[in-house]
Image (spheres, rainbow, N blue to C red):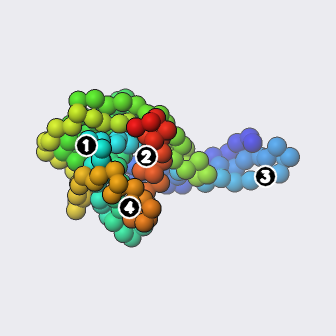
Amino acid sequence: MIQIATREVYRNRWMSVREDDIRHPDGSPGIYGVVDKPTAALVIPMENDGFHLVEQFRYALSRRSWEFPQGTWPDDRQTTTEELARAELAQETGLRAATVERLGSFAIAPGFTSQRCDLFLATGLTVGETDRDPEEQGMRQQWFSRAEFERMLRAEEIVDALTLAAYARLLLRGR
């Protein structure tokens, strides 16, 4: 595919949306709407064969959602995704990690967004204060055993695709 033209149709501090006119290999025209967001970091806080999750209201779903801590910077800050992962962990849970191990990276939803997510495993956790954003009002944090976490996945109590993908990557690493 060849991009013929592009135009930004929306922007806020978290993302931009563009519309691209394209030409398919057979010469026919097409159009793509693309959500551009910076690379995110997701962190799996693991201790005692269980995980710390956060629960928050997800506006797009009109419901609360249990998930691993994750996010992006709300500005154009240039840091490593490990620094972002450590910041998200502290901000959302109050936990600090002695060790943060990169588990890999994946495309979040390649059908409509350019965003990628780097995954990290956090261990050696100590408790501190949270520093949540205004959008994270009402967020809570709780530790779940691995058995309870897997039960929540099977029962579709956890619906966040990034959390599920991160857990699959963790299992593939033999953890």
Q: SS class of the residue under badge 4?
A: helix
Q: CA distance from mark 4 to mark 1?
A: 18 Å
Whether residue 34 is visible to the viewer of this picture, yes or no, is no
Residue 115: x, y in percent?
Answer: 50, 44
Label 1 crowd bin: few (<14), some (14–19), many (20+), radius 10 Å: few
Residue assigned mark 1: 48
Residue 164: x, y in percent?
Answer: 45, 51
User: In which quadrant of the rendered image does the C terminus lie?
Assistant: top left
Q: CA distance from mark 2 to mark 3?
A: 39 Å
The one nearer the camera, 72 or 48, is 48
Residue 132: x, y in percent?
Answer: 22, 50
Q: CA distance from mark 3 to mark 1?
A: 55 Å
Which is more N-terminal, label 2 or label 1?
1
The one nearer the camera, 102 or 144, is 144
Label 3 crowd bin: few (<14), some (14–19), many (20+), radius 10 Å: some
Residue assigned mark 3: 29
Residue assigned mark 4: 152
Whether residue 50 is visible to the viewer of this picture, yes or no, is yes
Q: Callout 3, which amino acid?
A: Pro
Q: Callout 4, which amino acid?
A: Met
> Do the residues bearing badges 1 and 2 touch, measured as CB atoms within 8 Å?
no
Q: Nearer the viewer, mark 4 or mark 1?
A: 1
Farthest-out residue, bottom = 62
> Do the residues bearing badges 2 and 3 touch, measured as CB atoms within 8 Å?
no
| Drawn side of residue 22 relative to residue 12, left or right | right
132 over 97 or under it: above or below: below
Q: Callout 1, which amino acid?
A: Asn
78 over 34 or under it: above or below: above
